[in-house]
């Protein structure tokens, strides 16, 4: 469905708020430029719409649709599947998730307490969605569908646990171990391995190896590999769940399409969550999920300090682009957030709202919805809101109104424009993430991703994410560099494609113990694996843990991290840095038309964990030497930590640079953009425009700017 209006909205719950205040709230939303309302995702939405089986209260929803339409607002409706009703739980007591401890997930806590494979749940969900979709498609105010809400197993512990939140030894439980899921897992394994003989060989383990005589004797692992359980068995179990949730999305999508072939569908999810950084425990693979829905959405809450906005949004943008979907932000932090009584964790203000929206737009978001418009009296978690509890306007709603004017004035451009492909890609391997979660090294993997991203990003590079399957395809062949943050396991096919990518002119960056294990999680006999050995021009002779690790680079000392490898170098491999005792620590190797850059320590995680600038400073030198330059740069004095986040959007004869400003001081800076077209005009401003001077030399445009610490965002338009 082609859109002419940019979807700019908020979450609002007509089943919660009294009907007599709907009109007042809707009028204020209309004033703010809101044209989409998202609803039915939480607050026991299915329970409220169908309090008893067969007793549907769609009349309430229909009255709200009509009133919203009179204010020019359409409805993004959730399928309600996140929170099935109590009567369903009572009718099917075994529908509740079964943990690895043999416990059912408690009712009355968070959403997704049920098993997605339970036949009773599937039947009732299909019946309910059949009625809901048949009704909604007839409503002129209907905009589209959100499938469930923040898909996956619960990221909150069902009961009090001791221990780290991201390990099954305490905190979040593993799910689901019901008979139906065990049977589905056996079917998945039979398709994967073909025979119990092949399965028994793959699941071989030193402490307790079982020989499986039949498929009925196969069971899912109930513990981590660190409890001396098979690593391959663990990888299979979590891959099974990632595929299962992707299939569940396809199932809901197909149910909707039986009635509604026109309105778009979206899944809202997230990445880098502190309870489950890479979706291993929740069963999330956004790359797979996105293939089964029209659009992929990421819920952004910067105030909770889960991650920086840019890395989070770049991951979502990368998933959407690789799968040919639009990127949406179905939930955007809208006010003071988190902490319950001891909060808020962050007192989100009007300046934050401005920055958040510009970050979303700059990362190719094609729909933005605040969460929520107005908070509710119960559950005082501090969920944020644009207005106060009585619905009165605040400085945040005023900022949202200003942003609404900007978005609608530029809707045609914002819907059509795209950010260019990044200069650099980070490898996102789900089997590797599953393995490291099972080895209780997930936080180190997260640090490696953060350190790698920040090192490239702070040097001005636009950073994408790719999967192993994407390496070497047409859309990834133009990356200047591919970085492998703590890729501990790798299959030979991936190693070969990385070798070929480098030989064709790319730069591959890797770190200690890269590819130490096969895709099964078994030892690699020699490091690096053969294809990587040729790429990097070295072999690993020994590895040790050491603390401290000191690396010397260009007369400066840096901290290494976690591992220290002893390397044997090929004659054409060039050491750029050394450990304190003289052993090579960083090696650059030419291969074909490209290069391999190898760090014999975890320089990726060292930046995030220790603040070591080794990776960043080596990249600064190597990228300059290889003439790898960002398409978009914003230079100013003492700007090494990137307190300003600019993003480039291009469509037809216009480029726009959207700037999110986090400065605590005023600066003079120079914006430079790589453009081949002869530029005619440059201007700045969200509403009132001002002409800007510029120069163009060869294929770059230079624009002098003055950025004030008091101005949260800026828009620079370049025309040719």
Image: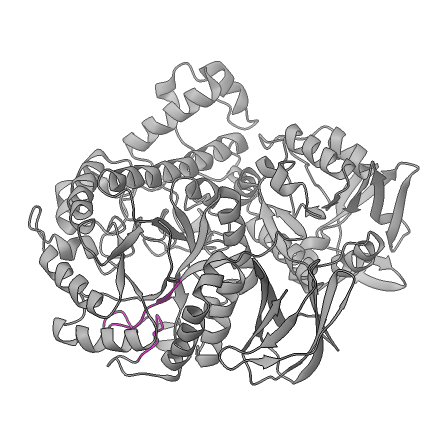
As for residue 635 lying within the magenta part, the answer is: no
* Residue sitting nearer the eye, 717 or 534: 717
Q: Residue at x 30, y 80 (%)?
A: 388
Q: Residue furthest right?
A: 571
Q: Residue at x 51, y 17 (%)?
A: 198
Quadrant that contains the C terminus: bottom right
Q: Is residue 643 visible?
A: no
Q: Residue at x 85, y 41 (%)?
A: 590
Q: Is residue 701 left or right of residue 60?
A: right
- Which contiguous range is marked in magenta? 368-387
How many marks overall?
A: 0
Q: Position of residue 71 (x, y in %)?
A: 23, 70
* Residue sitting nearer the eye, 331 or 134: 134
* Residue sitting nearer the eye, 696 or 429: 696
Q: Position of residue 683 (x, y in %)?
A: 60, 76
Q: Is residue 145 visible?
A: yes
Q: Is residue 473 left or right of residue 64?
A: right
Q: Main secondary structure of the magenta part?
A: loop
Q: How is the image coloured?
A: one colour
Q: Position of residue 23 (x, y in %)?
A: 18, 75
Classify residue 73 by image quadrant: bottom left
As for residue 384 lying within the magenta part, the answer is: yes
Measured along the vertical axis of the image, is residue 444 above or below residue 99? below
Q: Position of residue 426 (x, y in %)?
A: 63, 48
Measured along the vertical axis of the image, is residue 196 above or below residue 121? above
Measured along the vertical axis of the image, is residue 228 above or below residue 162? above
Classify residue 340 by image quadrant: bottom left
């Amino acid at each position: 469905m082609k859109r002419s209006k940019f979807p700019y909205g908020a979450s609002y719950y007509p089943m919660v708020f009294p009907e007599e205040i709907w009109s007042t709230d809707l009028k204020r939303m209309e004033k703010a430029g809101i044209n989409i309302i998202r609803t039915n995702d939480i607050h026991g939405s299915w329970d409220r719409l169908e309090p008893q089986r067969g007793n549907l209260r769609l009349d309430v929803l229909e009255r709200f649709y009509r009133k919203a339409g009179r204010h020019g607002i359409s409805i993004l409706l959730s399928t309600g599947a996140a929170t099935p009703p109590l009567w369903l739980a009572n009718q099917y007591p075994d529908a509740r998730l079964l943990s690895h401890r043999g416990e059912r997930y408690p009712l009355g806590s968070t959403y997704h307490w049920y098993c997605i494979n339970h036949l009773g749940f599937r039947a009732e969900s299909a019946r309910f969605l059949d009625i809901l979709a048949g009704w909604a498609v007839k409503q002129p105010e209907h905009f589209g569908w959100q499938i469930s809400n923040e898909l996956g197993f619960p990221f909150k512990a069902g009961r009090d646990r001791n221990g780290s939140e991201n390990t099954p030894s305490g905190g979040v439980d593993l799910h689901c171990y019901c008979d139906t899921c065990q049977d589905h897992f056996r079917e998945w394994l039979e398709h994967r391995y073909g025979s119990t003989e092949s399965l028994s060989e793959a699941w071989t383990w030193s402490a307790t190896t079982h020989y499986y005589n039949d498929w009925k004797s196969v069971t899912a692992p109930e513990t981590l590999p660190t409890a001396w359980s098979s690593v391959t068995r663990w990888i299979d179990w979590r891959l099974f769940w990632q595929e299962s949730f992707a299939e569940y999305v396809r199932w809901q999508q197909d149910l909707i399409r039986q009635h509604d072939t026109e309105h778009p569908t979206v899944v809202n999810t997230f990445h880098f969550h502190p309870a489950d950084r890479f979706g291993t425990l929740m069963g999330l693979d956004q790359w797979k999920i996105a293939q089964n829905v029209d659009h992929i959405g990421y819920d952004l809450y910067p105030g909770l300090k889960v991650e920086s906005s840019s890395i989070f949004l770049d991951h979502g943008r990368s998933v959407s682009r690789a799968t040919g979907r639009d990127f949406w932000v179905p939930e955007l932090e809208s006010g003071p957030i988190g902490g319950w009584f001891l909060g808020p964790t962050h007192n989100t203000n009007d300046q934050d709202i401005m920055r958040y929206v510009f970050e979303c737009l700059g990362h190719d978001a094609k729909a933005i919805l605040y969460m929520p418009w107005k908070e509710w009296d119960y559950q005082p978690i501090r969920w944020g809101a644009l207005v106060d509890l009585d619905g009165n306007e605040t400085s945040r709603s005023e900022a949202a109104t200003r942003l609404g004017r900007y978005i609608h004035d530029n809707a045609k451009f914002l819907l059509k424009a795209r950010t260019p492909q990044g200069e650099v890609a980070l490898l996102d391997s789900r089997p590797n993430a599953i393995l490291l979660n099972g080895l209780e090294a997930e936080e180190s993997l997260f640090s490696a991703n953060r350190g790698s991203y920040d090192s490239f990003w702070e040097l001005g590079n636009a950073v994408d994410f790719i999967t192993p399957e994407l390496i070497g395809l047409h859309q990834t062949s133009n990356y200047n560099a591919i970085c492998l943050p703590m890729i501990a396991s790798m299959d030979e096919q991936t190693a070969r494609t990385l070798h070929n990518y480098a030989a064709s002119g790319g730069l591959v960056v890797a770190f200690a113990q890269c590819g130490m294990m096969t895709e099964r999680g078994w030892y690699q006999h020699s490091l690096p694996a053969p294809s990587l050995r040729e790429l990097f021009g070295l072999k690993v002779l020994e590895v040790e843990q050491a603390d401290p690790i000191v690396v010397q680079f260009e007369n400066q000392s840096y901290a290494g991290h976690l591992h220290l490898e002893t390397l044997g170098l090929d004659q054409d491999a060039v050491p750029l840095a050394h450990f304190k005792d003289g052993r090579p620590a960083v090696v650059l190797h030419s291969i074909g038309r490209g290069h391999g850059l190898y760090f014999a320590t975890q320089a990726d995680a060292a930046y995030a964990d220790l603040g070591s600038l080794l990776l960043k400073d080596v990249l600064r030198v190597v990228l300059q030497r290889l003439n790898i330059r960002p398409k978009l740069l914003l230079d100013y004095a003492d700007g090494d930590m990137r307190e300003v986040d600019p993003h480039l959007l291009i469509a037809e004869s216009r480029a726009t640079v959207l700037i999110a400003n986090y400065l605590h001081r005023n600066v003079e800076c120079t914006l430079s953009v790589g453009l081949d077209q002869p530029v005619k005009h440059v201007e700045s401003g969200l509403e009132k425009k001002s002409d800007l001077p510029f120069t163009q030399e060869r294929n770059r445009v230079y624009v002098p700017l003055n950025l004030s610490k008091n101005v949260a965002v800026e828009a620079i338009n370049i025309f040719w």
